[in-house]
Image (cartoon, rainbow, N blue to C red):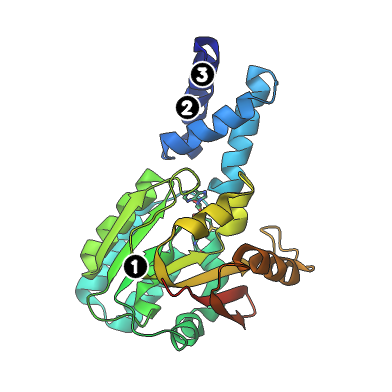
């Protein structure tokens, strides 16, 4: 990149990180969005605004209110050290409610993973792609005892919180900050969870879903799509995403089953990898 463009991108990135809402985001992720927006020929101010807008839509919009990780960790620690299992689940639910994706899943959470795992062989390792708060739903997943759990997302503070949670809950887990558009994860696992993630990535790069499915090295995948927009509109979304999923997997020779929950469209896939 020529020096004047590099300087402009660095200035956009610095302006974005000035804002508290975005300061925990992966610098690599922010830079990629800034580069794309900088090529659209707008003023500096408009480019910063467009970059923030994109970061809001694909990441920050899912966070509900202020992310109070220290307080939530204290509540979880109390629940894990002294409360019965049912009370722990209550505390987990209250934190899951602070990320829109897991909040939407709460009404179906008790059935969601038991129904899905009934279609899978025993699972010893999981990759949770663009995980949001979903690793906190580990207690609802019928995984093998001691299963490894890898997770990634673009917020440093969220990833740190998840790692503290894994340790507290005795889960062999590892969360990392990763932009899965630029670096799709590829460690071999039994199961990859790609929950409501593809549309979010494809807002930024329309080939990101295809590349993610090319890269992920899992014998089974659970790929899901929202059935309503963040604004609550539902019209035709399930049919639209079902058609899109078919287009993403055709010619791969994968087998899959479609499960329709009231809040989410789910595909359970066997890749034969
Ligand atoms: C629709 S939410 C899904 C969250 C989670 N999979 C679930 O269903 O509960 C999309 C998530 O993708 C994350 N995300 C957006 N762009 C990303 C990227 N390029 N790399 C990794 N994560 C990303 C957001 O921070 C957000 O947590």
**To which residue does mark 2 refer?**
18
Evaluate if marks 1 and 3 touch, with contact meaning CB atoms under 8 Å apart.
no
CA gap, disc 1 and disc 2? 38 Å
Residue 183 against residue 257 in the figure, above or below: above
The residue at label 1 has a CB less than 8 Å from ligand 1: no
Disc 2 is placed on an element classified as: loop
CA gap, disc 3 and disc 2? 24 Å
Residue nearer the viewer, 67 or 167: 167
Q: Is residue 130 visible?
A: no
Of tags 3 and 2, the one toward the viewer is: 3
Disc nearer the start of the sequence (1/3):
3
Q: Residue furthest top?
A: 4
Q: Residue furthest right?
A: 235
**Left or right, residue 197 beside residue 230:** left
Q: Is residue 255 visible?
A: yes
Q: Which mark is residue 46?
A: none
**To which residue does mark 1 refer?**
189
* Residue 214 percent coordinates (x, y): 50, 58
Residue 137 against residue 67 in the figure, above or below: below
Disc 3 is placed on an element classified as: loop
**To which residue does mark 3 refer?**
1
Question: Mark 1 Cα within 10 Å, few/some/many (few <14, many 20+)?
Answer: many
Residue 28 against residue 133 in the figure, above or below: above
**Left or right, residue 173 beside residue 137:** left
């Amino acid at each position: 990149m020529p020096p004047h463009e590099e300087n402009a991108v660095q200035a956009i990135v610095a302006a974005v990180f000035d804002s508290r809402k975005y300061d925990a985001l992966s610098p690599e992720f922010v830079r990629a969005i800034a580069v794309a927006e900088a090529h659209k020929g707008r003023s500096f101010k408009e480019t910063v605004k467009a970059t923030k807008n994109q970061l809001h839509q694909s990441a920050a919009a899912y966070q509900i209110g202020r992310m109070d990780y220290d307080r939530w960790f204290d509540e979880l620690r109390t629940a894990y050290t002294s409360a019965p299992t049912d009370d722990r689940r209550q505390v987990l639910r209250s934190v899951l409610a602070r990320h829109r994706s897991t909040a939407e899943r709460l009404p179906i959470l008790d059935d969601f993973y038991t129904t899905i795992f009934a279609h899978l062989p025993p699972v010893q390792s999981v990759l949770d792609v663009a995980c949001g708060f979903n690793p906190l739903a580990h207690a609802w997943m019928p995984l093998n005892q001691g299963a490894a759990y890898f997770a990634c997302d673009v917020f440093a503070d969220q990833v740190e919180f998840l790692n503290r949670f894994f340790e507290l809950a005795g889960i062999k887990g590892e969360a990392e900050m990763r932009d899965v558009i630029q670096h799709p994860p590829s460690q071999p696992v039994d199961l990859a969870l790609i929950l409501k993630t593809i549309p979010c990535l494809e807002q930024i790069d329309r080939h990101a879903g295809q590349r993610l499915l090319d890269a992920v090295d899992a014998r089974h995948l659970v790929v899901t799509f929202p059935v309503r927009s963040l604004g609550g509109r539902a019209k035709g979304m399930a049919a639209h995403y079902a058609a899109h999923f078919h287009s993403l997997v055709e010619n791969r020779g994968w087998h899959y089953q479609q499960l329709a929950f009231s809040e989410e469209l789910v595909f359970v896939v066997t890749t034969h990898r």
